[in-house]
Amino acid sequence: MQNVRHQGGAEAWAKDVETNMNKSLFVSAKEAEQYTLSECLDRYIEEYIPRLKHPKRETDRARFLQKRTLAHRIMATIRAKDIADLRREREAEGASGNTIRLDFALLSKLFNYARSDWGMESLTNPVALAAKPKLPPGRTRRLEPGEDERLLAACAPEYALVVRFALATAMRRGEIVGLRWQDVDIRASRARLNDTKNKESRTVPLSRAAKEVLQGLPRHISGRVFPFCPDHLSAKMADACRAAGLNDLHFHDLRHEATSRFFEHTDLDVMEIKAITGHKTLQMLARYTHLRTANLAARLDGARRGEVGRECPDL
């Protein structure tokens, strides 16, 4: 009787497959069962990564993943549990939650790309089902009263101009070093950003403080407003902070500071500030905004924006 039931089940499965094939619903698993994750990473490096803004960084990440035991597995056999095991391995090695998140993001793109472009429609994306690593809380570091003066005093003159410009515009590091004179119109108080993190160009209004920085700059032969590389800016920031005795302050914190000052020192509404900073969502904008309690208390007592705690009058 048991054999009959098994036979009946096999016949039912075969009939199901035949029906689906007739209905053009059948998806072959052949491609997904032929290639290992490592082989697919090779193809991903060759075909997809060259299109990215920072291909070397992504290539290094993909090569690192190829060294993991999981890379020898056939694509079709990788499940959410395997991705979870990889997360646990990386956590045990001391990798940060954000580093693991970036590993997962690459793997997720790979599986989606394999499904859409390489004929592996039968694949499911195991990364989408796996529990994500716990991320650390966002940074809330702001410049305390007097710290901006100490920082600027410790900076070389040409780098101090970069810091002042960052505080006046809330531009990202990459946006600052990518800015070209041909995209700046000081008379019209605007700068066009064509190379942004989210790949959407935007126009940034230039305050008096931002224009004062630009008007004092020489024109570099490269056409770039600030002829630095991104890592150079971060290294100079670290040197200046050490010299000024400032702890736990990074270049990207200047963007947090500038965004928070927009809320505290101007009458701009939230959508206007979002347009300036280039945040895609209000949730992301909120992560970059850290308002001082003293200013909020003054607002509760009827003060208008900018009437208290105004540390940078020309913002």
Image (spheres, rainbow, N blue to C red):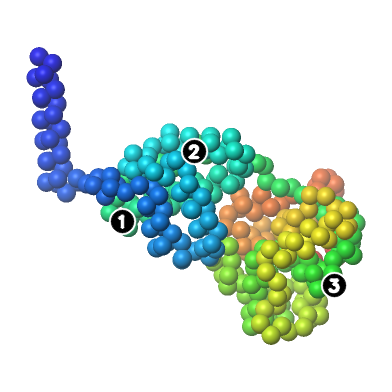
Image x and y of residue 183, in percent: 63, 79
The amino acid type of the residue labelled 2 equals Leu
Q: Nearer the viewer, residue 148 or 277?
A: 148
Q: Nearer the viewer, residue 265 or 35?
A: 35
Position of residue 27 in the picture relative to residue 241 (left or right): left
Q: Residues within 10 Å of mark 2 (few under 14, many from 20)?
A: some
Residue identified by numbered label 3: 157
The amino acid type of the residue labelled 3 equals Pro
Residue in view at x 85 percent, y 47 percent: 294
Q: Nearer the viewer, residue 288 or 267?
A: 288
Residue identified by numbered label 2: 86
Image x and y of residue 220, in percent: 71, 83
As measured in the structure, the alpha-carbon distance from the residue carrying label 3 to the one carrying label 2 is: 47 Å
Residue in view at x 62 percent, y 75 percent: 192
Q: Nearer the viewer, residue 301 or 81?
A: 81
Residue in view at x 85 percent, y 72 percent: 157
Residue identified by numbered label 1: 118
